[in-house]
Image (cartoon, rainbow, N blue to C red):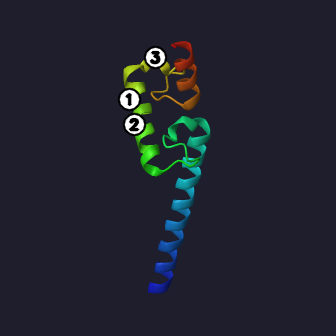
Amino acid sequence: MKKLIFLLVCSTAILTANANEEWKAKYFEFFPEADTNKDGELSWPEFKAHKAMFDDYYKKNPDADTNKDGKMNFKEFKAHKKANK
């Protein structure tokens, strides 16, 4: 029983890690500028720093939430940023 629980925990951890990496890769597709050291990969520190900027942008520009769902998605961010250059 302990081995089964261990295997389940390990499997869950691997799936979570893979999902996190996939999400980070998708974020990088939308925001290649987040790769601040220009090595072609988005590290977790680069991701966290860029995500903090993204969240701060929304706090300062709540009107970027054009569909009024209480959060700003990538499409809304890009559109707002482009419209307010």
At which x and y percent is residue 54?
Answer: 44, 32
Residue mark closest to the camera, 2 vs 3: 2
Q: Is residue 70 above or below residue 42?
A: above
- The residues tagged by marks 2 and 3 sit, at their Cα atoms, a distance apart of 18 Å
At which x and y percent is residue 3?
Answer: 48, 85
At which x and y percent is residue 68?
Answer: 49, 21
Residue carrying label 2: 52
- The residues tagged by marks 2 and 1 sit, at their Cα atoms, a distance apart of 6 Å
Hey, which residue is sitting farthest top in the picture?
Answer: 84
Q: Mark 3: which secondary structure? A: helix
- The residues tagged by marks 1 and 3 sit, at their Cα atoms, a distance apart of 13 Å
Q: Residue at left 56%, top 31%?
A: 74
Please tell me which residue lies in front, 33 or 17: 33
* Amino acid bearing label 3: Asp
**Residue 1 visible:** no
Residue carrying label 1: 56
Q: Mark 2: which secondary structure? A: helix
Q: Residue at left 51%, top 13%?
A: 84
Residue carrying label 3: 63
Q: Which picture quadrant has residue 38?
A: top right
Q: Residue at left 39%, top 36%?
A: 52
Q: Which mark is residue 67?
A: none
